[in-house]
Structure formats: structure tokens, C-alpha cells
Image (cartoon, rainbow, N blue to C red):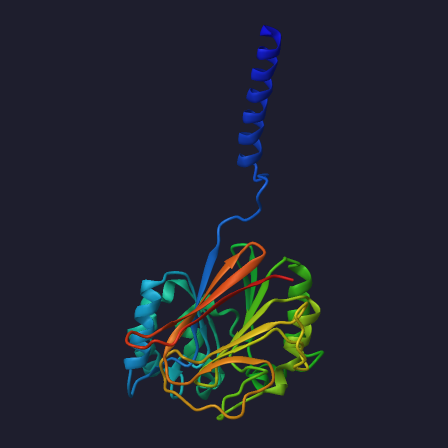
Amino acid sequence: MRRQLLLNCGIAAFSLAAFFFFSSSGFTSSSAGPSAVLIGAGDIADCTGLEGAEATAKLLEQNPGTVMAVGDLAYPDGTKENFACYNQTWGRVKSTTRPAVGNHEFHSSGATFYFEYFGAAAGDPKDGYYSYELGTWHIIVLNSECAEVAGCNAGSRQEKWLRADLAAHPTACTLAYWHKPLFSSGDKHGNDPEIKPFWQALYEANADVVVNGHDHDYERFGPQDPDARPDGKRGIREFVAGTGGKNHRPFGAPKPNSELRNADTFGVLKLTLKSGGYEWNFIPEAGKTFTDSGSGVCH
């Protein structure tokens, strides 16, 4: 009996020691790990009226995370003066912002003041695209102003970079954001087929989520392939979040796979990125009631 008791105690002590060893070495039985927050929108600050940008800036302060500023940040022309207005609002979270460039930034030649304002956080000024890691996710930021980077077509410099970046980061979960959406029901702009090669590369690499702006509304699409065919197994979920504060614009006819639309609420899209999955939550400006939430798993 005593021998059995000593044996049991020895096994318990070994198990406890092994637990602490494997835990400290990162080899716990659970691979969940901590989650990370990516939050933001596009189409943000206009010096002629900053009420919307101020409302969404407050949401960012109340919900800390890495901020995705998804293009058209400083209206109307991305000048130094326009960025001074952006700075009054979303500039309060500049230290945590990873921006994407939009068409209005390029109203100033070469998006000069955009790159000057954000510095290294915006990537190489000759490109305007880059990637980074956030928690267990790989995040890719692209430049949808194709004429400014010698095209977005298959075989273009940016498309080759994207494919190389995806190959170099074969993580379980991948998200990309840029300004102009491939799919949009917005009446002003709608679909932009010029950037379809981005989607093709991302789809082939099993990417999970795309976030865009450009149309001044909020829209969520179900998982689909680059040809707008529903694909629950490998499809990419797209969000259009052009709700940063500029103004609102109406929708046209709903595009295939559009699941939810709103065109009267400023707000930010909050993505909680976990190991193996994500949650989304559209947070509206104070005084508005529209929300959207859900979850998905990585491919």
C-alpha cells in the first residue's frame, strides 16, 4: 500500500512538472492563444464637416485595437491641409493605425501627403502595399489604385508580390484590406473588376476575409469565389465598410451573395481575430441602432 501511494505521488509530481514545462514552452493542449482586434473603416474625414469622422474616432478610442484605415482618409484631395483634419479625428489613434491608400489620396501626386503623414506604417511609397502579423493572423494591405502601380492585372508587380507574400506566410488565417471592392451593391461605384486578380490570388491561397471601402455604406457578403459563386468551403467573406464619416450614399440593386446592407449609419467594423476563426461586429455611431455581428472559421 505504501509503495503504491509513493508511486501515485511520483506520477502526480511528474505530471505537474510536465504541465508547467509544456505550458511554458508553448505546447499546451489548447492552441487557442490570445485573440487580436482589427478595427476600422474607410472614407473618413472631410474638412467641410468632421462630425462623422469625430463620431467614429470616439468609437476607436472606446474599442482599442489595431486600426485599419481603409482608404479615402482625407477629403477631398489628400493634401497636407486635408490630413490636418484627419489628424483632428482619427489622428488620435495614429500610433496603432495601419492604413490603406485610396483614390482621393492620389489627388495629390503620388499620394505624397498620405505617405508623409503615416511614414513607415504605410509601407514603401513606391508601392503602397505591405503585410504584417496580428496575433495568429497574416494581414495584407493592398493598393487598389492600379494605374499608380503599373496595374493590378495577373503578372503585374503588385500581383506577383501578393502571390509571393502569400506563399511566404502559409498561416491558417489570412485577411486582406484595400480601398476598392471587387463586389459592392453601392449605387455610386459598385463592382470593380480591375482588382479581381487580387481575389484570385487570395482565393487560391485559402484566404478568409477581405475588407474594403469606396462605397459609403456598410455591406456584408457571404463566402464566395472570385466569380461571385457561393462557396461555403473555400470562399472569401467580404465586408464593405465605407462608414468612417464622410457621408452616406444609397444602394443599387443587391449583388449576388449580399447578406446585409445599411446606408444611414457611420460606424466601425471590429474583427476579433482568433486562432482558427474570427468574430465580426459593426459598432454604430452614438445614437444609431444598426449593428451586425457573427463569426466564421478559417479555411
Left or right: 229 as drawn, with respect to 99: right
Q: Nearer the viewer, residue 176 or 94?
A: 176
Q: Nearer the viewer, residue 291 or 184?
A: 291
Whether residue 218 is situated above or below residue 122 in the rendered picture: below
Whether residue 70 is situated above or below residue 3 in the rendered picture: below
Identified at 58% across, 75% down, the residue is 222
Identified at 67% across, 66% down, the residue is 206
Q: Is residue 250 visible?
A: yes
Left or right: 262 as drawn, with respect to 92: right
Q: Is residue 129 visible?
A: no
Q: Could you say where residue 29 lies in the image, as x and y percent from the top left?
A: 59, 40
Q: Quadrant of the C terminus?
A: bottom right
Q: Could you say where residue 97 lies in the image, as x and y percent from the top left?
A: 42, 66
Q: Could you say where residue 249 lies in the image, as x and y percent from the top left?
A: 42, 90
Q: Nearer the viewer, residue 139 or 168?
A: 139
Residue 168, by quadrant, is: bottom right
Residue 146, by quadrant, is: bottom right
Residue extending farthest top: 2
Residue 12, by quadrant, is: top right
Q: Quadrant of the N terminus?
A: top right
Q: How many marks?
A: 0
Q: Could you say where residue 219 lies in the image, as x and y percent from the top left?
A: 49, 80
Identified at 32% across, 82% down, the residue is 81
